[in-house]
Amino acid sequence: MKYLKNLKIIRNFISDGEADSLVKLCDRKLNRISRNYQQNHFDSVINSYRECTFSDFPNTELLDRMKREAFLFSGRKEYQHPHILDLHKDGVISAHVDNINAFGKVICGLCLLSDCVMIFKKNNQEVFRVLLEKNCLYIQKDDTRFDLSHEIPREAEIDGKLIRKDRRISIMLRDII
Ligand SMILES: O=C(O)CCC(=O)C(=O)O
Ligand SMILES: [Fe+2]
C-alpha cells in the first residue's frame, strides 16, 4: 500500500532510562506553564492536554538523532523547535492534517509513557492503523502527511488486541517550510 512507504516507525528508539529522564524534563517545562490539562470543546482536535514549544531543549543529542532519522527518511534538514504534547489518559486527538501553511512535509514524533494506536483516514474512511509503542519514533512524510488525516483514540483494537492509551507525552519535530 503506497501510504505505508511514507511512514516509518522505529521501535525502541530510546531506552526506558532515557525515556524516564525525558519525561522528567518535559514535566518540569510543562509544570512551569500549567499544571492543568486544557479541556476543549468536543469539536476541537485535541482534548485534555498540555503543550509547549521547548526552544531551549537541553538534550541536543537526542534532537540530533531525531533530526538525522527524519533527514534520512525525508531529505529535510531544517526543523522547528521541538513541540511537547502531554495528552491526559482520557485525552484524544481527533482526525486532522497538520497545518500545511505552518509546517513542511515531514512530521516526526517520539512517543513516551504509553502505547497507542494511530489511525489514518482518507475522506473519513480508514486506510490503515498502526501501533505506536512507547519509546518509538515515528516519521510521516509526503502523501501520508498531506493526503491522510491522523488521529489517536482513547482505545482501539489492533492485531486482535485492545490498546488503551494511558497518559502519553510526544516530542514532535516538524520541518521548516
Ligand atoms: O502525539 C502525537 O504523536 C501526534 C500529535 C499530533 O498529531 C499533532 O500534534 O498534530
Ligand atoms: Fe497531527
Image (cartoon, grey):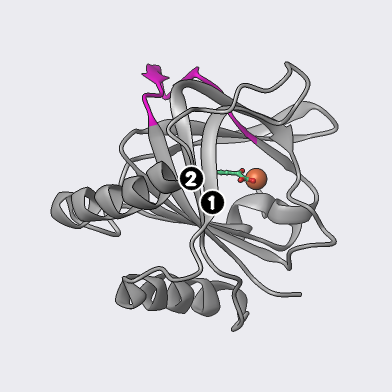
Q: Amino acid at mark 1?
A: Cys
Q: Which is more foreground, mark 2 or mark 1?
A: 2
Q: Amino acid at mark 2?
A: Ile
Name above or below for residue 6 compared with residue 47: below
Which residues, given as a range, are shown in magenta? Answer: 151-167
- Of the residues under marks 2 and 1, which one precedes in the sequence? 2
The residue labelled by disc 2 is: 33
Q: Residue at x 44, y 79 (%)?
A: 68
Name above or below for residue 17 compared with residue 92: below
Residue 60: quarter of image: bottom left
The residue labelled by disc 1 is: 52
Is residue 123 covered in magenta? no
Instruction: Pick whichever, 144 or 59, lies toward us.
Output: 59
Percent position (x, y) of residue 139? 53, 59
Percent position (x, y) of residue 31? 39, 42
Percent position (x, y) of residue 94? 67, 28
Q: Residue at x 75, y 27 (%)?
A: 44
Decide if residue 25 is on the left or right side of residue 168: left
